[in-house]
Image (tube, rainbow, N blue to C red):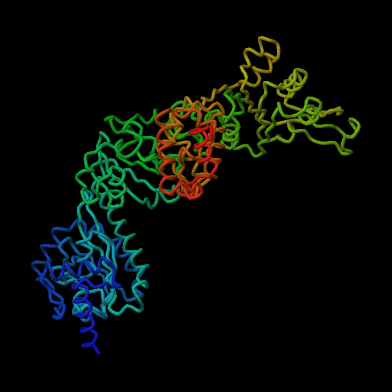
Amino acid sequence: MAVSNQVRHVTEIEQVLDGQQSQRDATVVNSWIRCVSDYRLDPSQQVPAHIVSPQCLREHRQRNERLIHIARHGLNELFRQVAGHDYVLLLADNEGVTIDYFGDSRFESELRRAGLYLGAEWSEARAGTCGVGSCIVTGEALTIHQGDHFDSAHMPLSCTAAPIYNPDGHLAAVLDISLLRPPGPKISQNLALHLVRQSARHVELANLMHEQRRGWVLCFSRQPAFLDVDPEHAIALDADGRLVGMTHSACRELAALMGCSWRQPRKLLGQPISRFFQTDAEHLARLARNREPAQRMLLATDNSSWYARLQGPDWTPLNQSLSLPSRTRSNNAEPHPGFAELHWGDQRMAALLQQCSRVAKTNLPVLLQGETGTGKERLAQAIHTASGRPGAFVAVNCAAIPESLIEGELFGHAPGAFTGAASKGRAGLIESANGGTLFLDEIGDMPSNLQARLLRVLSEGEVLRVGATSATPLDIRVVSATLHNLESRMASGDFRNDLYHRLAGAEFWLPALREREDLLPLAQVLAQKHAGNAQLSPEVTELFAQYGWPGNIRELDTTLRFALLLSDDHRLTLAQLPERLLRRVPQGLKRQQSCSIEQAIAECDGNVSAAARKLGVDRSTIYRHLRRKSPTN
């Protein structure tokens, strides 16, 4: 039976060498071809496992002593997870020699004969197609299962391997997890492939951290949830913010951003951080671990968004050699987490939020001023959250309640105070905020007669319901907001001076969106809030940077929601933007958009529906373009 299996195996290899189609993976087919053409191996000859001499093994282990030490903990943990399933773990160096080994001692002699043992050489040139050897050649994680092996002596085995790279991007070792007698088809090893990849990534990260323990390491991931405990990628930077090391997954990402092959790591080393991400050494300190992960967002040069963590010898910017005194650090403590998502790198907002975080812990009334849509209510909510007050956050839009109803809505009423009044009376919005925060939006539009009543509430610390004879004591924090210039309203007599000074214990002006440095990161965050995989094309980010945004963050958010509805793949282009923005598109961008639409129409032989599907837009977008181009048609 074994002889017939060997004959079938040799015949299959010969058919592949003759150019016939095979159901084997391309990785396996290419390896078989190398085994014959490059290594001159004979598939009909079974070659026993080769174990190097003790002296040779000692030399290989000495050359990799640090890596063995660093990898030990991770390999112990991996073996603990798989030990009950009869797996064997091999750590081989970049020449294929097994320099560390974890296996069940009950099967030691059998494992040694199979080559799953310390000192076994699994290079492709010696052992043919195999997990370790083929991983070394391809640089990729893979599974070589049973008949995938070139040498029929190894056909009973299933070997799953993943490469481990040095911080300089070159192959250091291979982690292999093998079975003497696999229980099922190749797909049964998918979990093993996942585990070995994960363990190799952990070893690379530990090696990078050890090598850069006195330097700077930037970890980054697509999602913030596990950034601080299990980051996807990591890079090392020198004092000037230049790349000096990386994990392999980071190498692949950076190579893609730079437009080169990950197999050429020298092209990446020495590059400034700004070559890959929209930041520089001076601004990396904001990614320190003492900020909430969701606040540590980093945009790549292709506008993809990442969450990052910087760690190093101190918290100073990279290009400063002296650390900040501890007193300075405490005076510039990070804002309360409630403010985490209100800015994404704008220095003016960062300073404002730091001040708000301090004020939040007091009972000082706060007045927020700024254009419509700049986020005044969001900031008011953050102040309430940071205050720790147990009561509710009650928002009142002073401009939205009719003047005939605003007194009853704000102050409440006693039983039978007027026709139609509730028989048991009703608490007003001010009283509902007792113990919490009262947010008075558009305070500049409050009628003059009610300004005096509000002033009395703030002065006396109690509220008198309409028709009542006794007041209710209050413990409220008041945050007000307006888009009007209250100084000019006071000058015209439309707003009371004494009320203004009661409300403006602390006064903050929110910058307009067009003035903020973090417009593009903020746009990316808002887009991903509505669709987790949303991406903005370079043309869209260029337009966003040039547009004036009169409606500020509110307008940006509604624009993104509209565009995402028109996009099939959530990659936003100019074609999905609303007409009001397209009218302001610079001529260069208009020509670029026009070319992409016309190219899609041509490729679809004039079929507008097909072109719309190709671009991920609605047909009306293409029809609008055609009407603008030929208004008489």
Q: Is residue 404 left or right of residue 121?
A: right
Q: Position of residue 112 (x, y in %)?
A: 19, 77
How many numbered callouts? 0
Q: Is residue 80 left or right of residue 346?
A: left
Residue 428 occupies quadrant: top right
Q: Position of residue 357 (x, y in %)?
A: 52, 31
Q: Is residue 466 above or below residue 122?
A: above
Q: Position of residue 89 (x, y in %)?
A: 27, 69
Q: Is residue 575 above or below residue 11?
A: above
Q: Is residue 134 left or right of residue 181?
A: left
Q: Kindly identify the residue that appears in the image at 37 percent across and 43 percent down.
A: 309
Residue 364 occupies quadrant: top right
Tell me if I can see residue 79 in this picture: yes
Q: Position of residue 209 (x, y in %)?
A: 28, 48
Question: Split into 4 quadrants, where in the image is the N terminus?
Answer: bottom left
Q: Is residue 208 left or right of residue 48?
A: right
Tell me if I can see residue 331 in this picture: no
The extreme top residue here reads: 491
The extreme bottom residue here reads: 1
Nearest the viewer among 362 and 511 is: 511
Nearest the viewer among 483 and 106 is: 483
Q: Kindly identify the residue that appears in the image at 37 percent across and 50 percent down.
A: 231
The extreme front residue here reads: 632
Residue 368 occupies quadrant: top right
